[in-house]
Amino acid sequence: MREERAQGSTTPAWVEVHAGRTGLALPLVCDSPHSGTRYPEDYRHAIDRRALRMGEDTHIDRLWGHAPEVGATLVLAHFPRTYIDPNRALSDMDPSMIDGPWPGEAQPGPRTLALGMGLVWRQTPTRLPIYDRLLSVQEVQGRIDHCWRPYHAALRQACDGAVARWGSCWHLDLHSMPSNAYQRLGLPGHRKLADFVLGDLNGRSCDPSFRDWVSQVMREHGYQVSVNDPYEGQELVRVHGRPAEHRHSLQIEVNRALYMDEATREPHEGFERLRADIASMLGEIARFVRWRVREGSDS
């Protein structure tokens, strides 16, 4: 286990990296950017912590914790995504939240403007304002330097290391989704939300054979799977998914109703079964990657 500590920071380490098990290491990298539950002392939010926790992908790090046992590198964020979101570009910043001119590029996307869920969250999914003040440029830059940059550096190092050693990298970007995701996103809710949603930026972030293998494995375990509906992927698969360069990135969303009480965030009776199934799935995904490495092909 290795932890990244921002230089000069007295805060706890915010990023954790688990290497693949010795002797089984593969060019398979998993990351959980939104399961962090350590809330920094300088957050100074104006709402109850329980409301903020609705932004967490709670327990995703535990559900996929078997990854190093099959040879995958696992990168984890300990800071909460509502504090700063590593799955958003630095430019996805809402300048109306800042008490002065933002020195960097600010091009907030439609989701950020409509839902307030950009690089720094303005409100919770239930539209509760997180702050009763404007944020200073200094505090946002501190969040970037202490959390966002170390997370991206750790994930980049893991992916680059895989390519340097094996010539290819397969990346799983791990998330959870609320059971009322269509409603949260303002989409027609007549469809039943799948158990797993795979996002590959509509075919741009990984070879279809990788996505199809993961989908097949999940279906064989009895789960319903959809592709790019309602989540296509965000910044991390955009950055690391470059199939032409032998870098394949796939976002995976897990329906929270499968494993936890969404109000209390506590695991329910389905948690252990799902964790066991995911461990089995990881073994099958690792088999795919090992086969590709042995064949000297990534597609």
Image: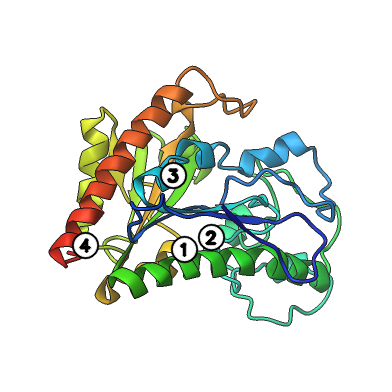
- Dot 3: what SS? loop
Who comes first in sequence, dot 1 or dot 4? 1
Q: Which residue is mark 1?
A: 236
Q: Which residue is mark 2?
A: 87
Q: Which residue is mark 3?
A: 187
The type of residue carrying mark 2 is Asn
x%, y% of residue 59?
Answer: 55, 36
How packed mark 3 is, by other alpha carbons closer than 10 Å (few <14, some 14-19, many 20 or more), is few
Relative to 282, is 270 above or below?
above
Relative to 96, is 253 above or below?
above
Who comes first in sequence, dot 3 or dot 2? 2
56, 202: nearer the viewer? 56
Q: Quadrant of residue 90?
A: bottom right
Relative to 241, is 174 above or below?
above
- Dot 2: what SS? loop
- Dot 1: what SS? helix
x%, y% of residue 49?
Answer: 76, 38
Residue at image coords 42%, 38%:
254
The type of residue carrying mark 4 is Val
| Side (left or right) of 215 relative to 271 | left
Q: Which residue is mark 4?
A: 293
x%, y% of residue 113?
Answer: 61, 61
**Distance between the Cα atoms at labels 3 and 4?**
40 Å
**Distance between the Cα atoms at labels 1 and 4?**
23 Å
How packed mark 2 is, by other alpha carbons closer than 10 Å (few <14, some 14-19, many 20 or more), is many
**Distance between the Cα atoms at labels 2 and 4?**
28 Å
